[in-house]
Amino acid sequence: MKWLSDDKLNHLRSVVSDPDFSATKYTFVKELGRGGMGVVCLAEDRELDRLVAIKVLNTPEDFGDRMIREAQIIARLEHPGIVPIHDVGKLPDGRIFYAMKYVRGNRLDEYAAQGASLRDRLRKFQAVCDAVAFAHAHGVIHRDLKPQNIMIGSFGEVLVLDWGVAKIRDDPRSSAFHQTMEGTVIGTQRYMSPEQARGEIDQLDERSDIYALGAVLYFLLNDLKVSKAAQAISAKATATTKESRYTTASELSADIGRLLDAEPVSAYRENAFERTSRWVGKNRFLVLLVLAYLLMRIFLIFTSRS
Amino acid sequence: MSKPLIGVILGAVLGAIDGLTAWFTPAVRNELFGIVIGSTIKGIIAGIAIGFFARKFHSLPIGILFGVIVGAILAWLVAFMQGGYYFEIILPGTLVGLIVGFATQKYGTPATAN
């Protein structure tokens, strides 16, 4: 009797589980990752001669049409910070797939682990907020924002991925879909708002995404020494009650912008000493010049006396 | 706040400080009031000139250089009229011009196009 080696066995297992793209214009290249909702593969688009990322969803047959419809809505989100969906369809085995732009780069958690500076992290985070604000303005709530769903491209561009569990606000068909899922917990626990953790699907709105953004910000700031203002922004975004959070992702982005410009932020009330320190820090060269001038005056006074 | 206004305020404040330090020179102490007024006016004139220059030309190095030149020239005139204390007047006057030149280039709202 011949025994198969572990390597050969694993190869056979992967071949069997690899999505069958034979009836599509795509050629499977390799698996990029696997999650609860499905598997993401690298594939070649034979018609356009380019690489794409394809997410194959492990959804029951009766959710397939709804997922395609939601993909159509998300495909209309044309924003530089949102990964575009190129195609959607069904595999021969009935599984739904999305084809989207293949982003060469690092996930946000990998980017932070490489030692990115505080300013760079905040700029990337601000770009994420702007993309999410755009989606919100078009009635789309992501519901699964986390560092692993944010890519930093090789040119520094920021892209939000994985809109597979997004909710379309005020869409009666989407509402019907989500009512069947009431009580179901959707998202990633660490970045989940309290209302999301309780499975209150109907209560989710833009502020649930803002909670997740605040958790992402906390993750980015966690291993750095940051100001009280930065901590306050994260704390406000992750407030337990929706009413205490930022109302929009644009507000959160604006506060990050003020933090980057050494301006006062809405989330934190400075005392006089902190305000002065911030002003001095922002204008340190001018302050040094004036101090140099005063020292020079003192020097001249002493030399004229002697 | 406009750049000329920043120049005026900073020039006046630093000019006044300049003049007040004359108190430490006993020989001119009884002329202190006139010295402070003159020094403040010198600072204001320098601030206006440097501020309007900053409104027209947006270059930090050139703005600083212009400020140094204006500060030095005005300070020299004052020292000449005083008939002495050239070093004690020109050096701080030049530094005031440098500071005002820097501040007017860095801060203040630029002129808007019509």
Image (spheres, rainbow, N blue to C red):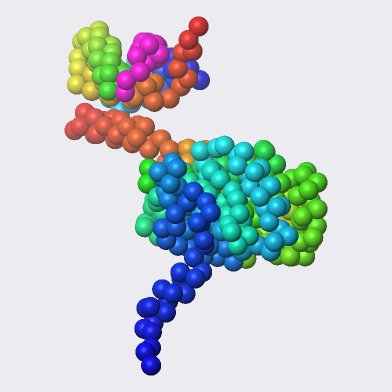
- Residue depicted at x 38% and y 38%: A284
Instruction: Decide: is B64 above or below A114.
Output: above
Q: Is residue A224 left or right of residue A189?
A: left
Magenta stretch: includes residue B44: yes
Residue in front for this viewpoint, A280 or A225: A225
Q: Position of residue A234 (x, y in %)?
A: 58, 53
Q: Look at the image and tell me whether residue B19 can be seen.
A: no
Q: Position of residue A183 (x, y in %)?
A: 77, 65
Q: Hey, which quadrant is residue A270 in on the image?
A: top right
Q: Look at the image and tell me whether residue A304 can be seen.
A: yes
Q: Hey, which quadrant is residue A111 in on the image?
A: bottom left
Question: What segment carries the magenta color?
Answer: B42-60
Characterize the magenta stretch by its predominant secondary structure: helix
Q: Is residue A281 left or right of residue A141?
A: left
- Residue depicted at x 57% and y 37%: A78
Q: Hey, which quadrant is residue A302 in on the image?
A: top left
- Residue depicted at x 48% and y 17%: B2
Q: How many marks?
A: 0
Q: Position of residue A65 (x, y in %)?
A: 70, 52
The image quadrant where one finds the C terminus of chain A is top left
- As drawn, the residue found furthest toward the bottom would be A1
Residue in front for this viewpoint, A136 or A260: A136
Q: Position of residue B74 (x, y in %)?
A: 28, 11
The image quadrant where one finds the N terminus of chain A is bottom left
Q: Is residue A33 left or right of residue A288?
A: right
Magenta stretch: includes residue A54: no
- Residue depicted at x 27% and y 18%: B62
Q: Is residue A28 left or right of residue B30?
A: right
